[in-house]
Image (cartoon, helix red, strand yellow):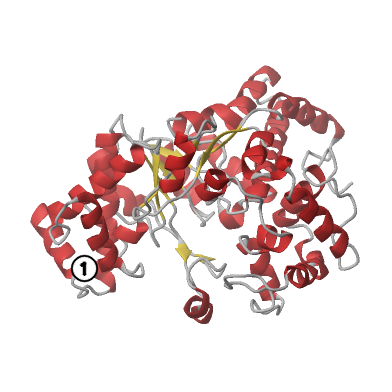
Amino acid sequence: MLIHPDRLFPAEPGTRKIARTLYEYVRTLPIVSPHGHTHAAWFARNEPFPDPARLFVHPDHYIFRMLYSQGVPLEDLEIGQPEVKDARRVWHIFASHYYLFRATPTRMWLDFAFQELFGLEQRLSESTADLYFDTISEKLLTLEFLPRALYERFNLEVLATTDSPLDSLADHKVIRESNWKARILPTFRADPVVDPEFTGFAENIAKIGEKTGEDTSTWAGYLNALRGTRLRFRELGCTATDHGHPTARTANLAAAEAAELFRQVIAGNADAQQQELFRAQMLTEMARMSVEDGLVMQIHPGSARNHNRKLHERYGRDMGADIPMPTNYVDALRPLLDQFGNEGNLTIILFTLDESAYSRELAPLAGHYPCLRLGPPWWFHDSPDGMMRFRERVTETAGFYNTVGFNDDTRAFLSIPARHDVARRMDCAFLAKLVAEHRLEEEEAVEVAHDLAYRLVKKAYRL
């Protein structure tokens, strides 16, 4: 077998037995996936997924990032090409380098999918590459592997996509108008219309003005256009916004000052400091709108995005060259929290790539402000050890109930069950240790395990 039944459970036999017991209570709970990057079009069209290379390698920056680090040119993987000319060759390159993923979460996610979905039990390698390619290709053409069938097989209760404010959401409308009862919801990703460094920013502002009938050359018209766009998302079930700013900085400018800053930004005259101030002001404006309409805010700061300039110029955004950097929350969030930190109708979920902030800043903040919750380990820390470090550093101050369970944040649809399974196993391992040390009763641990796997995420995201 590729995956062991006791994977990720404690090595000590007594504690491992407790973890097994806890896991059995949560193993088959429905999956709630409130934040990810899968495509609504898959489910609207319900067409077979493409070949294994385009299904596993191309959408997953965890994979091609590792291969690139070991000297595999992205051209050899046919990344960025409108069509893949030789999918089998791409798959062979991946398979021959599969050893690179030893002891990484990527290996665990992939092995889970290979075994549990496709029945493969030999390790992927150059010698088994064709067996894998042919087996996966054959099964992808069956009814059981169509997107809607996999959604149901995965026991998904909710799946949220991440969508530009400029998206028509036509695929979401198709899903809603069909007889299929799945719950697939959009998420309002504000960056294209609130980040002056986003490619085509001024044009994007003009487009949302056209879509909403607002004069977005003015500050008031721009804010009204954002409100109207949020309403359009909410009408299709959206419950959350998402903000991928470089920092967590917020601001609270006077209306006239904000209007003048907007004028400078929209004209393309803002320098780097003014652009950062504008993003900071827009986080506060988004919070103000969330108080009005109830959308949950997600803030994903701290990534130096598109760090590899040459790759960015050639292939565009999101090519795996994003690097974590130190992030301040205490000072950065103060202007927003001074305005809305005590609001009962506001939920802000904070994520980080800076683990040093867990116990120093994030846990104390979430352990005090009613509007703040802590998102799960994200991106580089979406791993067994990252999850354990998170629980160890935040639980004593923030407890379990100022966190929001788990979200997979993935572009790789087939990895969703594996990622949630890893999170459930690690939470059970953490809880088992508390039970073994007589810091928590086993009955309490069962309840907490259920909350972490299911209840908290539904409550936090208003699902």
Outermost residue to the left: 256
Secondary structure under tag 1 reads helix
The image quadrant that residue 246 belongs to is: bottom left
Outermost residue to the top: 443
- How many callouts does the rendering have? 1
Tell me if mark 1 has few (under 14), some (14-19) or many (20+) residues whose alpha carbon lies within 10 angstroms of its own: many
Q: Is residue 249 left or right of residue 265?
A: right
Q: Who is closer to the viewer here, 375 or 197?
A: 197
The image quadrant that residue 31 belongs to is: top right
Which residue corresponds to the image point at 34% horizontal and 38% vertical from the top-left?
A: 234
The residue to which callout 1 is attached is 265
| Depicted 449 relative to depicted 119: above or below | above
Q: Is residue 168 left or right of residue 49?
A: left
Q: Who is closer to the viewer here, 221 or 440?
A: 221
| Depicted 298 relative to depicted 451: above or below | below
Q: Is residue 431 left or right of residue 122?
A: left
Residue 44 on image: x %, y %: 52, 44
| Depicted 401 relative to depicted 272: above or below | above
Residue 214 on image: x %, y %: 16, 52
In this view of the protein, can residue 423 be seen by the observer? no
Residue 91 on image: x %, y %: 76, 67
| Depicted 272 relative to depicted 169: above or below | below
Which residue corresponds to the image point at 50% horizontal and 30% vertical from the top-left?
A: 458
Which residue corresponds to the image point at 79% horizontal and 60% vertical from the top-left?
A: 102
Residue 220 on image: x %, y %: 13, 52
Q: Who is closer to the viewer here, 426 or 74?
A: 74
Name the amino acid, label 1.
Val
Q: Is residue 49 left or right of residue 227?
A: right
Which residue corresponds to the image point at 71% horizontal and 56% vertical from the top-left?
A: 106
In this view of the protein, can residue 291 be seen by the observer? yes
